[in-house]
Amino acid sequence: MKNQNVNLNKVYNLSRVPEGVYSIDESGIVNLYLILGEKKAMLVDTGMASGNLAGVVSGITDLSVIVVNTHGHCDHICGNYQFETIYAPEKDLKLMKTFSNISLRIIAILKNLAKGQGPKYSTIKRNNRKPVIPFGDGAVFDLGGRTIRAFEIPGHTRGSVLLFDEQNRLLFSGDSIQRGQMWMFLKESIPLASYLESLKKVRDIVIKSSIVFPSHTESFAGTEVVDELINGIGNILNGTATGDPFRKFFIEGRKYDMESCCVIYNPRRLFAERREGFNL
């Protein structure tokens, strides 16, 4: 590591986790992860770009860096423009066009400015889009001495993926498996029953993992979280659980709390795709 400063740019808080991985916390908005191989490095997501993320990364390593997005939401892709080689889930490419939005990034930057953090407003780069290389289920990224494999987990978005470090058994789960809130109530989220099937398919990957690194909550080990989600969603689908009314971003849903996590879902999209959405 070239830069020992753990509060870089007053935006990014850096910590080293096991096996040549750095966690980069962007102002409590999102956790990004830099994985170092022998020949190149992988940056898992790029956050809201409310600071000089490329400068933080170059302070850690001289290796060539590829960006791999776990899905297409703004808090995972807005910093893509700071890097040259970007891989994105093919099924979220349309979603990325919607969320590569300069106004969304400006909101995040202004929030940081209000706290005395981040760059001046005048430094915001206007062009927030760069070409991406699409990938799908089973894609393999060879970093030299470590291989990262992608597993599709449709749910939070249609193109969401898990990234599994096969040699070190580390799983980077994006917004698809984590403690705390699981957002399944967005219009781009798939029906809850389909997400349940995704969870069942990837459970074996969680079993193989020594630790899981989510995008918004603390890391964890074991299958407790995924098992809670599987059981809780099963209860919702069989009608034995409903949860409480929930509203965010003018979108309505229901919030079902479990011990370590909760699912926020659209009760009108449990089993099948429909054009109808929430009450806006």
Image (cartoon, helix red, strand yellow):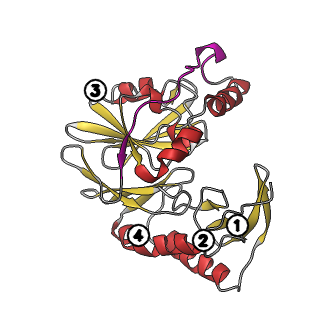
Q: What is the C-alpha distance between the residues marked 2 and 4?
A: 16 Å
- Amino acid, disc 3: Asp
Q: How many marks?
A: 4
Q: Which mark is residue 15?
A: none
Classify mark 3: residues with Cα within 10 Å, few (<14), some (14-19) or many (20+): few
- Compared across the picture, whether 217 is left or right of 165 comes to right
Q: How far across and down, in percent of the image, does residue 93 sit? A: 47, 45
Looking at the rendering, the stretch of residues picked out in magenta corresponds to: 118-135
- Amino acid, disc 4: Val
Q: Which mark is residue 192?
A: 2
Whether residues under marks 2 and 4 lie with C-beta atoms below 8 angstroms apart, the answer is no
Q: Which residue is mark 3?
A: 62
- Amino acid, disc 1: Asn
Q: What is the C-alpha distance between the residues marked 1 and 2?
A: 8 Å
Whether residues under marks 4 and 1 lie with C-beta atoms below 8 angstroms apart, the answer is no
User: Quarter of the image containing the N terminus?
Assistant: top left
* Magenta stretch: dominant secondary structure: loop
| In the image, residue 70 above or below residue 233 | above
Q: What is the C-alpha distance between the residues marked 3 and 1?
A: 45 Å
Q: What is the C-alpha distance between the residues marked 4 and 1?
A: 23 Å
- Compared across the picture, whether 106 is left or right of 165 comes to right
Whether residues under marks 1 and 2 lie with C-beta atoms below 8 angstroms apart, the answer is yes
Q: How far across and down, in percent of the image, does residue 9 sit? A: 54, 23
Q: Which residue is mark 1?
A: 266
- Amino acid, disc 2: Leu
Residue at position x 62%, y 77% from top? 232
Counting residues from the start of the chain, the first of labels 4 and 1 encountered is 4
